Amino acid sequence: MRSAGQRGADRAGGKRRARARGGADLPPRGPVMAACAFRRSIAAQLSKVLDLPPENLIKSISAVPVSKKRHVADFQLSIASVLEKHSGDCLAQDLQLQAQKLAEKLKCDAVVSEISTGPGTVNFTINRELLAKTVLQQVLKDGSEYGIKSELFSLVPRQKAVIEFSSPNIAKKFHIGHLRSTIIGNFIANLKVALGHEVTRINYLGDWGMQFGLLGVGFQQFGDKEKLKSSPLQHLFEVYVQINKAAEDENIKKLAADFFRKLEEHDEQTLSLWKQFRGFSIEEYIRIYKRLGVHFDEYSGESFYQEKSQEVLRMLEDKGLLQKTIKGTGVVDLSEKKDLSLYSTVMRSDGTSLYITRDLAAAIDRMNKHSCDTMIYVTDKSQNSHFQHLFQILKLMGYDWAERCQHVSFGLVQGMKTRRGEVIFLEDVLDEVRSRMLQNMASAKTTKEVEDPMETAEKVGLAALIIQDFRGLLSSDYQFSWDRALQSRGDTGVFLQYTHARLHSLEQMHGNEQLTDVNASCLQEPDAISVLQHLLRYDEVLYRSSQDLQPKHIVSYLLTLCHLAAVAHKTLPVKGSAPELAQVWHGAVTVLLRGRSMRRAFGRATCWGFARSCRTCPRRLTSQQAGGPAGRHHARRAGAAARGSASSSWHTPP
């Protein structure tokens, strides 16, 4: 977001105070949020001067981020964006001069109290009483819909989206690396649903491949049915470790190959054991997803596409895309010159399918089943080339919708350790974060009694994990730090949770009084104005995240809101204050929670999927507290084809 820049020191620089006059353009009435009303009013005046339709100017008018400087404009028009779109010849001219010339032609009115210029911008300050009244009334009116009704989304069509995320391997404990895929995919799904899109969440399990032959043999030798029922993933992990020690033994190799062959032939006894592995695994995953506040609409898996992948191979051959190598493998030429300088292997020498072949079958099946507008895959960045090949092959096969497929990749988490050493399982991390938060709560001098310390510690700790994960660019690796994530001060999930609880308490002090008419004159303190200005930007932040699917924009916005609210709380009186001040806190709480309608769901997860929250009251937090490769069958390229998930729809192999 651009800064407001310097202000003109005189009239020529574009600064004028408003004179009270009647007949000025007021923000239009209707189901639009406050920022939209102000943008429209500004755009209406600009359109008369620039001779451009107001709707063409809306996206060039942006809310100005709150500055540490006391006086800052509320909106700014980027001269470059207007010239670039409508008058390319003028780009070479001095943008500052263009801004000053435009500002001189504009007039203050009942909406805009001040007009100034900055480096290439024209800045607009909204009448302070009108700002306070409009923002608060809009928050009260829209509730959980605040920010979503913005005209910034008016040209964004409602879509059907299929999102594949998490995708662990069955019969294996949930790896910590899958945490990123799970929480990022959940964020994207929640954001799209909030914006009115229809979303199907798919967990594509790694449930097929040669490794199940080895696991099957291992269970026959070392398995225990009772242990499988009581602690399935832990027991299967122990079995896999034992049998893997003998994996190079030729006899074991033969037995494993025979087991998997029987599995492919649908041998009843072999298939029954595999189904137990799959069923117990999914039950365990659902339990862990419940701790995370995540759900799925469909549990699919590679096993579902073993036969459909053969149909894909026949399609590739019919289209002349499948080429045989000297070794007998099947490849698709992806090179521009068609010289096999770039290719993707889609078939083994024995004619069986590979991981990418099953992905091709899955993509085609999903499009036929859901008729979706977009398909999104959430995995770590090591699979970038895989998805490039996948989408390219789909295009070569004639599927134009491949252009609407998207791979959201993410970097690795480094330094994730517990006191016992390396952490490799997600549940260990969840237990660890709960343990550390309990210790922090116990050691804090201001800790008060809580109803359920374990639950509170887990909720706050999970928020801390997720906020630290979402603060940066998804594609970047980052160094994890327990101390930094759980500290009481700074931009942390703990601070965000505390602020929400504290603001809710301040709101409750006024008995949740709903105002029918806002007396904005009592909200002219700079710190109150800063909170209101920040609330103006919410729709822009949502829009930006909806475009690039990066949670960092929303996280940064929420943390800034927490800091602004904390400052306002210190400087503004609470006891005996006007109820309008409580509505400022209510506005902040509404945005933090996405409204009161989310409160029941907030016991499990925030709307955006940042964390489950300690939603009830500030006593649940102390004042001190206030202050690896991941996802989608990481090893499948090596032949370990497998994935995992949870939901209402179940796919089983034919």
Image: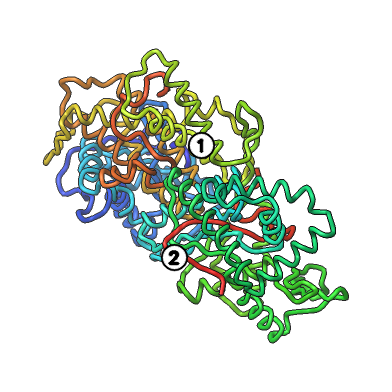
* Marking on residue 430: 1
Answer few, some or many: residues within 10 Å of disc 2's Cα (few below 14, many 20 plus, some between 14 and 19).
few
Quarter the C terminus occupies: bottom right
**Residue furthest toward the left?**
516
**Amino acid type, residue under disc 2 in the picture:** Ser
**Amino acid type, residue under disc 1 in the picture:** Leu
Q: Position of residue 266 (x, y in %)?
A: 62, 73
Query: In what element is the residue under mark 1?
Result: helix
- For the point 38% across and 41% down, the residue is 123
Q: Is 249 located above or below residue 8 in the figure?
A: below
Q: Is 379 located above or below residue 429 in the figure?
A: below
Name the foreground residue: 330 vs 255: 255
Residue at image mark 2: 649
Q: Is 282 located above or below residue 487 in the figure?
A: below
Q: Position of residue 258 (x, y in %)?
A: 74, 67
Q: CA distance from mark 1 to mark 2?
A: 27 Å
- For the point 23% across and 20% down, the residue is 573
